[in-house]
Image (tube, rainbow, N blue to C red):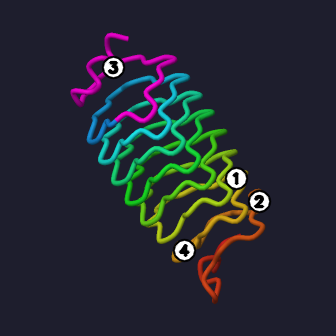
Amino acid sequence: LAAAARWPEGELAGARLRGLSLSGEDRRECRLEGCRVESCRLLGCDLRGAVLRDCVFVNCDLSGCNLRDSWFLRCTFTGARADGADLSGARLEHFLARASRLEGANLDGASLAGCVFADCRMAGAWLTGLRAKDLVLERCDLTRASLVGTPLRGQDLSECEIGGLVLSESAAELRGAV
């Protein structure tokens, strides 16, 4: 808890946060480095412009968070929940989400490099205009997700649920995808 008390000042390094409830808090432009965050509730937090490096989030709930223009570098989400979170304009680099929920999350215009989403529920997510390099979607539920303007060339969607995808009229997003 002592580490959490310093978080409002903006930076935390090497901390272990467990079981905290910081719902609705304003933590804009905070910096977390090398932190392990477990079973924390961050519902509706304002984390715009946050910088998160080498962090692990396990069984955390970030639903409804404003993560607009944030930067996730070498971060992992396992069993995390970010339903309805706003990640528009965010940068995710070498990011792994496993068995996590991002239903209705907004990643409009986000930049993804070296990201893996495995066994994730992303139904109704806004994945529009993504700038993605080395993106992997494994066994994800993409039902009703909007992919307008996000090219999926080379992407293997054979094990993903893709019913009701929202695409451009020409469905150009799926050209070259399996």
Marker count (numbered): 4
Q: Residue at x 32, y 31 (%)?
A: 32
Q: Are marks 3 and 1 in contact (CB under 8 Å)?
A: no
* Residue kind at label 3, given as amino acid type: Gly
Q: x, y percentage for residue 37?
A: 46, 24
Residue that label 1 marks: 140
As displayed, is residue 53 above or below residue 178? above
Residue at (71% x, 63% y) in the render: 157
Label 1 element class: loop
Q: Which residue is at a point 47% across and 29% down the rendered structure image?
A: 56
Q: Which residue is mark 4?
A: 151
Q: Earlier in the sequence, mark 3 or mark 1?
A: 3
Q: Position of residue 161 (x, y in %)?
A: 77, 59
Disc 1 and disc 2 in contact, CB within 8 angstroms: yes
* Front-most of residues 140 and 67: 67
Q: Any mark on residue 161, and which?
A: 2
Q: CA distance from mark 4 to mark 2?
A: 17 Å
Secondary structure category for the residue under label 3: loop
In the picture, the disc for residue 14 is 3
Mark 2 and mark 3 in contact (Cβ < 8 Å)? no
Q: Earlier in the sequence, mark 3 or mark 2?
A: 3
Q: Is residue 42 left or right of residue 146?
A: left
Which region of the structure is painted magenta? 1-25
Q: Which circle, 4 or 2, is nearer the viewer?
A: 2
